[in-house]
Amino acid sequence: MQQAVSGKPRIAAIDIARGAALLAMAVYHFGWDLEFFGYMEPGTTVSGGWRLFARSIATSFLFLVGVSLFLAHARQIRWHGFSRRLAMVAGAAAAISAATWFAFPEGFIFFGILHHIALASLVGLAFLRLPAWLVLVAAAGAVAAPHFLRSAFFDHPALWWVGLSSANPHSNDYVPLLPWFGAVLAGIAAARIARDSGMLDWLAGLNPGRWKMPFTFAGRHSLAFYLLHQPLLIGCVWLLAQFWPAAAADTEIQFTRACIQQCGQSRDEPFCAAYCACFTDVLVAEGRLETVMSSSARGLETETRLSQIAAECTIQAETGTPAGERDGADERP
């Protein structure tokens, strides 16, 4: 959304912050592209420091959405500009969903950051005139909700956007309403506090040097930057792969990579490491790995066995004890 109320100049510091968040997002996506083409270890960008990096980028970007929403519409909602911008964001979100459906059907983006911004911008209007302390309480509630209110009721795909399903669905970019709306609300509250304390006037008076130009340019064209940067980056990595391809991994490593990447969407790093190691070991021991990697060769018996292995390895990853040993121990007097 636009960052300043009508008749007031843009605040360069906010454009710089938004531009920095976008450039950081480009760095993360470049890492994801390198991993996708085999130049980085499997699961790198969904675990450890990379995972924290991604969460901090999304948090800062959504925080700035809340700041901009307040600055643009706190005094009066300018419906013409709001509706125009909302239509652009919602249309871009729909385009992202369509494109990723064809490119990555198993992990397509059905509710990513653009989808969240469109919905949060609408819902956020209800908080613009509330006291900052009350908005902060609502922000804390939004962040805490997934820790206390998850339920199988929200497991239906039509409700995945809420963020309260018992397990997170698989998607290459999943930013549900909860807990992420908390960052938008925090931005609204911070902007109100900054306005009431005079900090906004101080920020408006800052005049950074020429170094700010890449950041302000990206910040002022955030939607275009978001839509264009990933196709350009993945195209560059694809071109690199045509001349200097990554070393081919053997079948066992390929399976483990895919397992960790998918598992990391809904479980933590230690669980995924143990679960995928267990799954791979069982498949190798039973001579099923090649069959599993060739989806066309799977049959009912293989699919049934995969479900059993998944259950067994879940037990082992959660308890640290192989399922067979635990069952045997339970039978002893």
Image: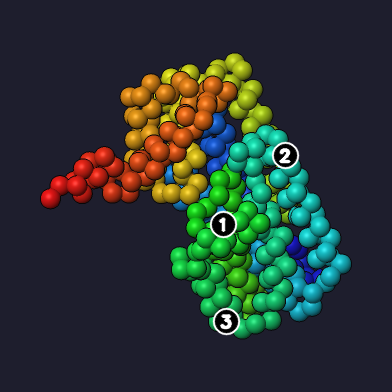
Label 3 residue SS: helix
Q: Badges 2 and 1: C-beta atoms under 8 Å apart?
A: no
* Distance between mark 2 and mark 1 Cα atoms: 25 Å
Toward the top, the furthest residue is 243
Which is more foreground, mark 3 or mark 2? 2
Mark 2, residue position: 99
Q: Determine crowd level at label 1: few under 14, some 14-19, many 20+ residues with C-alpha closer than 10 A.
A: some
Mark 3, residue position: 134
Label 1 residue SS: helix
x%, y% of residue 243?
59, 16
Q: Is residue 30 above or below residue 219?
A: above
Q: Earlier in the sequence, mark 2 or mark 1?
A: 2
Residue at figure coordinates x 75%, y 70% from the top left: 72
> Residue 66 sits in which quadrant?
bottom right
Q: Earlier in the sequence, mark 3 or mark 2?
A: 2
Residue at figure coordinates x 45%, y 65% from the top left: 147
Q: Determine crowd level at label 3: few under 14, some 14-19, many 20+ residues with C-alpha closer than 10 A.
A: few
